[in-house]
Image (cartoon, rainbow, N blue to C red):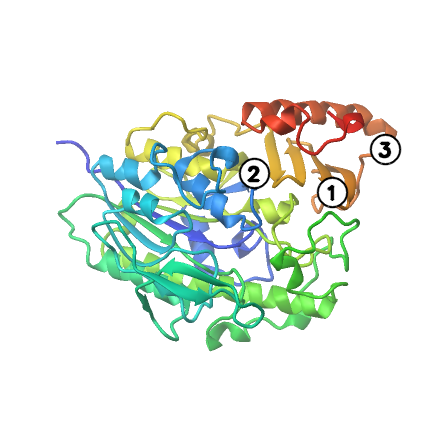
Amino acid sequence: MAEKKKNVLLLIADDQRFDTIAALGNPQIKTPNLDRLVKMGSSFTEAFIPGGTSGAVCMPSRAMINTSRYLTSWENFGESIPDDQALLGEQLKDAGYNTFGIGKWHNGTRSFARSFTDGDDIFFGGMWDHWNVPVNSYDPSGKYDHLRHFTQDPFSSNRTIELPAEKINVGVHSTDLFADKVIETIEHLDTEEKPFFIYGAFLAPHDPRTMPEKFKHMYNPENIDLPPNFMPLHPFRYDIRGERDEQLVAYPRDPKVVKQQIADYYAMISHIDSRVGDILDTLEKEGRLDDTLIIFTGDNGLSLGQHGLMGKQNLYDASIRVPLIMAGPGIPKDHRVAGKALLLDIMPTILDYTGAAVPAGIVGHSLLPQINGQDDGRDTLFLQFTSKIRGVVNKDYKLIEYRTADGSHTQLFDRHKDPYEITNLAFAPEYRETLDDLRHQMRDLAATLGDLDFSQGKLFWSREEKI
């Protein structure tokens, strides 16, 4: 008799960056349950997103998770997924899994319908008031056509949008709403039925940074350390000040205000952590903990005062590095995985782990060999943010090139000596050869990954600066 396939639980936080788990090196944050998950499994020390094609970075990021395709694969930034692109949930469904979608789905109703056989409290949007999220029950027809009008930001704009919305659980925080639904799903699973895939996607710790009273005063901002790369202003303008995220805190950035922002951010993560603990406890109570692959990650990071920025519309580590923890049968325990990984590697990793078919057209690869020490991970990553920034990162250096309405700039950082990316080496004569090599790597990677306008020098580079 064939061995029963392992279950899969994928949990995704919104805007949670890589350095926000106590067990992975942050003594100021309280995350006992994520620490427990770290001890249960393997944690990647260099998990990245490659950047974003939209100011709403989470939209293409989640599209990459669910398709294992690259950032440039969608004309609408991942707001919807073409029918000819295979999806993670769809592949698992075809492999005999019951697939459940819960929480935030930022990539269109058709792709959700293709991915899941069930689910609830589904939010087809990006960000919202955490206490009043417009959600949907699972629709077997896949139509999700009950559109409702909402004022997107009633305190500063008259702009209205339409979203599929069936109900609002008034006064229930989004983290509790979605965690409770994950728990309820686990509790009501038929143990004799097919294996399950649960996709649980949080809205936190994305702003507005509000949380239940229990967590509201967990962190005293006076005791929060500013990051070593805190700056009142970014070293130069690069056509980013109009982004919504950058307008949350006045210029120049006030250290006290930034400390409060970080305290609130940590509080929201501790709230998620508490509910992750409840989910782990439920798996254990239901006898599912030992036969389930559990993955916890974030869709992108957040600056919160680093380099004088507040958002994720940049290519600094704080914005493009995320937590990535995997625990389950056969995954080494309390293990740190060196080498670079991308979130688009999650899909082929799950498919490899479960024995499901790997579709053509994906660019990710399974991380299981890397976890088991049989592979060193990706050598070099191509980075991009909209038409404004391009970059490349390898083991030793990161190069970032800006060509915007506010001017052209180049940054080169030594990743070993300068992990906070403070000292720009781009104009030091002894790094000229390194700079040239990285520029050529960046051009070649751009061509490989479909950023043809950039690789051919047509995007925003002047003739003199073409690389």
- Say whether residue 333 is left or right of residue 209: left
**Image location (x, y in percent) of residue 48:** 55, 40
Q: Residues within 10 Å of mark 2 (few under 14, many from 20)?
A: many
**Image location (x, y in percent) of residue 346:** 42, 38
Q: Amino acid at mark 2?
A: Pro
Question: Is residue 196 positioned above or below 276 on the image?
Answer: above
Which mark is drawn over residue 50?
2
Tally of numbered discs: 3
Which mark is drawn over residue 428?
3
Instruction: Name the one closer to the observer, 188 or 177.
Output: 177
Mark 2 and 3 residues: CB-CB less than 8 Å, in contact? no
Instruction: Name the one closer to the observer, 108 or 260.
Output: 108
Q: Tell me the residue at 78%/39% (across/down).
A: 408
Q: Secondary structure at mark 2?
A: loop
Q: Secondary structure at mark 3?
A: loop
Q: Amino acid at mark 3?
A: Ala
Q: Secondary structure at mark 1?
A: loop
**Image location (x, y in percent) of residue 2:** 16, 31
Q: Residues within 10 Å of mark 1 (few under 14, many from 20)?
A: few
Question: Is residue 367 positioned above or below 111 on the image?
Answer: above
Which mark is drawn over residue 271?
none
Determine which residue is flagged by label 1.
418
Please identify, in this view, whether the residue under mark 2 or under mark 3 is nearer the observer. 2
- Say whether residue 459 is left or right of residue 451: right
Q: Amino acid at mark 1?
A: Asp
Q: Counting residues from the N terminus, which is met first, the one under dot 3 or under dot 1?
A: 1
Q: Counting residues from the N terminus, which is met first, the one under dot 2 or under dot 3?
A: 2
Instruction: Name the one closer to the observer, 253 or 341.
Output: 253
Q: Which quadrant of the structure image shows residue 145?
A: bottom left
Question: Is residue 264 positioned above or below 382 on the image?
Answer: below
Separation of residues labelled 2 and 3 (CA atoms): 27 Å
Q: Tell me the residue at 61%/58% (across/down).
A: 245
